[in-house]
Structure formats: C-alpha cells, structure tokens
C-alpha cells in the first residue's frame, strides 16, 4: 500500500456516499431521457438504436438529454428552450424623431 493511501485509511473514521442527481436544464430533478435525432426529439420507434456501418450515407446526429417530466411531455429540450427564449427577446427600438 502506498504511504499516502495508508495514512488516509488511518485518519478516515467514516465514509460518506454522495448521491449524484441528474438535473433537467430548468434545474428540476431529471427523470426522463430524451433521444434527439438531428435536433428533433424522438418519442416513437425502436427502443435501442444501433448505427448501420455498412452505408455510405451521412449518419444522423443522435444525442441524449435528461429532462424533467414536464419538459419531456412537452418535448422542450434545452436547445428548443434557448431558441424560444431568443425569439421572445425584446427587439431594439429604432430612434424615430418626428
């Protein structure tokens, strides 16, 4: 045993197990996985998707994101929420002197 590890075991009197909790982009507890294919959340189809290495076609971009139940049911991913937020931003007013 390494001397440093031995010393840590000598002084360690307890162990705390840390539970890591997945969070949705909104900060709530994430309970659902969303499969996003080419930027679109997919809720139907095969449960397990395996890529086809035999074709020369460009493969689809597949990513996964953890979401809370509310955002999974509404199909609101972090990218979609950001796009909607940016589209609702106030537009700059033009100076109009009459």
Image (spheres, grey):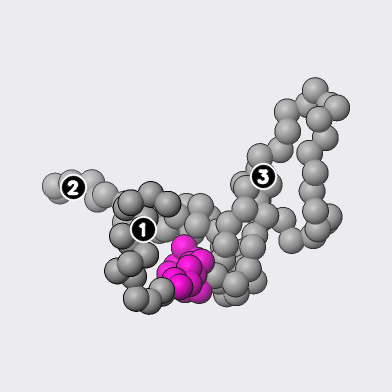
| Residue at image coords 67%, 44% | 62
Q: Dot 2: what SS? A: loop
Element type where label 1 sits in the image: helix
Q: Which of marks 1 and 2 is in front?
A: 1
Whether the magenta-drawn stretch holds residue 25 is answered as yes
For disc 2, the neighbor class at 10 Å (few under 14, some 14 to 19, many from 20) is few
Q: For the residues labelled 3 and 2, say whether their Cβ atoms are less than 8 Å apart.
A: no
Identify the magenta region: 17-29
Label 1 crowding class (10 Å Cα cut-off): few <14, some 14-19, many 20+?
A: few
Provide the residue designation for mark 1: 6
Image coords of residue 72 (percent x, y)? 62, 68
Q: Which mark is residue 62?
A: 3
- The residue positioned farthest toward the top in the image shown: 56
**Main SS, magenta residues:** loop
- Looking at the picture, tell me which residue is in the foreground, 94 or 28: 28
Which residue sits at x=46%, y=63%?
A: 25
């Amino acid at each position: 045993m390494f001397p440093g590890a031995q010393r840590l075991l000598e002084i360690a009197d307890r162990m705390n197990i840390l539970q890591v909790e997945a969070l949705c982009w909104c900060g709530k507890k994430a309970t659902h996985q969303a499969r996003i294919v080419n930027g679109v959340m997919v809720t139907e189809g095969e449960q397990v998707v395996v890529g086809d290495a035999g074709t020369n076609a460009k493969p689809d971009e597949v990513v996964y994101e953890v979401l809370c139940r509310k955002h999974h049911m509404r199909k609101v991913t972090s990218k979609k929420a950001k796009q909607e937020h940016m589209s609702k931003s106030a537009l700059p007013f033009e100076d109009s002197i009459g």
